[in-house]
Amino acid sequence: MASGSAAPAGGGGKQRNYLNCIRATLTAAMCLENFGSQQVERHNKPEVEVKGNKELLLNPIIIARNKEKVLIEGSINSLRVSVSIKKSDEIEVVLAKRFMRFLTQRAENFVILRRKPIEGYDISFLVTNTHTEKMYKHKLVDFIIQFMEDIDKEISDIRLSVNARARVVAQEYLREYQ
Amino acid sequence: MSTSEIDHLANCITTHAWNGDRSKVAISPNSNEVMIYTKKGNTFELEQILQEHDQVITSIDWAPKTNRIVTASQDRNAFVWNYEKNEWKPTLVILRINRAATYVKWSPLENKFAVASGAKCVSVCYFEEDSNWWISKHIKKHKSTVLKVDWHPNNCLLVTGSSDFKCRVFSAHIKVVDKELPRTVFGDKLVFGEPLLEMNASGWVHGVKWSPSGNLIAFASHDSSLCIANVSNLPPTIQKVNLRGLPIRDLLFLSENSLVGVGEDCNPLLFQSEGGNWAFVSEIDKKSEQAAASGDSAAGNARKLFASKVTLGAESVTDTKLETQHQNCITSIRALTAGAVVSDFSTVGLDGNLIVWHTKALEAKFKELKIK
């Protein structure tokens, strides 16, 4: 895998190309196997988090589309996917932060969610060989792609509703002064 | 005759091994136990559970002639089990490694076995009569964890695959155990642990195998490629076959010209050589045309769509089940019949399925699959 950023071809379905590119990379990076630690005896740690030995890590890949990007770091027994959400204005910055905090506080229920995102990104997933042994790989990839699509939709929905509520509140308040 | 038989033995199987007459199979259900199943008619019955290891068992090998099982685990131990009085009794193995053991294989004469480990070395173990235990000699010279080993038919050469991107051949000749030194293409004077050949790969080497004659070495690496090296003459000629899908984990030579690779694609892949040129022939797990055609109909699809909307809140029809018989990565492949051409082989995967494939029935059903 070579490192670098990949911009999709122009035309219709730009987001489709972007997500297909991420899907292909994730399917390849999710080939994980159970690997006992080389550093500490009898231990089994996700190598992408420990970063103990360079030869066990794959080259990190960034797939970017304008402001939104995805960082995929792979290793022999674990995979870390970090997503940076597109935020078009100040309101979305605040909303994204709150939404991500809501999710990361419930990281245990999510199983593959990482409690703290990587520097420079909004949210991170950590998939280990135990996850791929218990769950279908293609469904895990589907989940992450679906998650990315839903986040964008959710945040724009929330922003619209925030603006709508602000307008209604302002109307009611200023009615006093009409 | 059916092309394959499928048995669900556990939630997730990491490795398996058959006994000499193929009536029993030992599997590791991704835990620290070995489960021994006996084939009764069409089903498998659990016969015994061997519990001695503390951590997950990474590899099992069953010696067909001497009926001994060797197991290796991430707790840096290995045990040799002997069948006495209807029970399997463990014998101590002094591996002297300080990291996890990743793979174990009996030598063809079953007087030695090799253990690959995360301590960047391979332990070749032999039995010491006086102390009643197995002692080891180390092959170092690896820069990272050794993932797989395989023995040459002459009982003295060992090929190893490692996560330092290299496939190496070593001499594993032990004076005490091996009576005579075989003549090999690498020379007559073979010192134990001496590296005889080093081949580069572009990824972690997951699977290594000698061909039945010992003239070819096949190694599969994580960059989704399969290399076949012809070592009948030095320097070896290496051929690289790029795979269409995901990496291969384990290999099996069906004959000198046919090779099956299994891995993350959940589908055994057949490779064959035409006069020395190796190429991918076909996948072995194929749906016949009629089964595929009768699957989809407009009404059936609509019903599936509404069913998934009600139960899962899903907007589109997504199939959770894979089309292949294995639902998750295939971890191990074993030959069932010995001889010049292997006609049956078995695969186990992380989905917990043990599938036995019959090549004669596959050849009859699909014209392209001809095992030479």
Image (spheres, coloured by chain):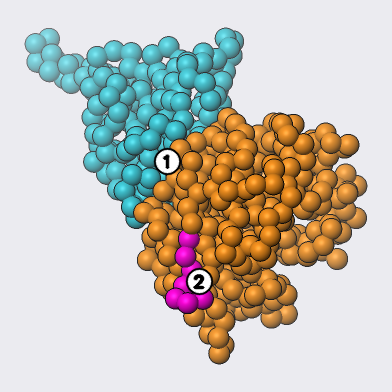
**Membership of B131 in magenta stretch:** yes
Q: Horizontal placement of B89 versus B370: left or right?
A: left
Q: Residue at x 63, y 62 (%)?
A: B178
Where is residue B196 drawn, in percent x and y?
Answer: 62, 40
In this rendering, which labeled residue sits more in front, label 2 or label 1?
A: 2
Disc 1 marks a residue whose amino acid type is Ser
State the residue lying farthest toward the bottom.
B85
B227 w.r.t. B57: above or below: above
Q: Horizontal placement of B288 versus B198: left or right?
A: right
The answer to which of B217 and B277 lies nearer the viewer is B217
Q: Secondary structure at mark 1?
A: strand
Residue A150 visible, this orientation: no
Q: Which residue is mark 2?
A: B128
A32 w.r.t. B291: above or below: above
Q: Counting other residues with Cα less than 10 Å from the Cα at mark 2, is it few (<14), some (14-19), or many (20 or more)?
A: few
Q: Residue at x 27, y 38 (%)?
A: A115
* Disc 2 chain ID: B
Where is residue A39 drawn, in percent x and y?
Answer: 33, 44
Disc 2 marks a residue whose amino acid type is Glu
In the rendered image, which quarter is residue B151 located in?
A: bottom right
Q: Which residue is mark 1?
A: A78
Where is residue A167 drawn, in percent x and y?
Answer: 23, 17
**Membership of B369 in magenta stretch:** no
Q: Which chain is cyan?
A: A
Q: Which chain is orange?
A: B
| Residue stretch in magenta | B128-136
Marks 2,1: beta carbons within 8 A: no
Quadrant of the image for the N terminus of chain B? bottom right
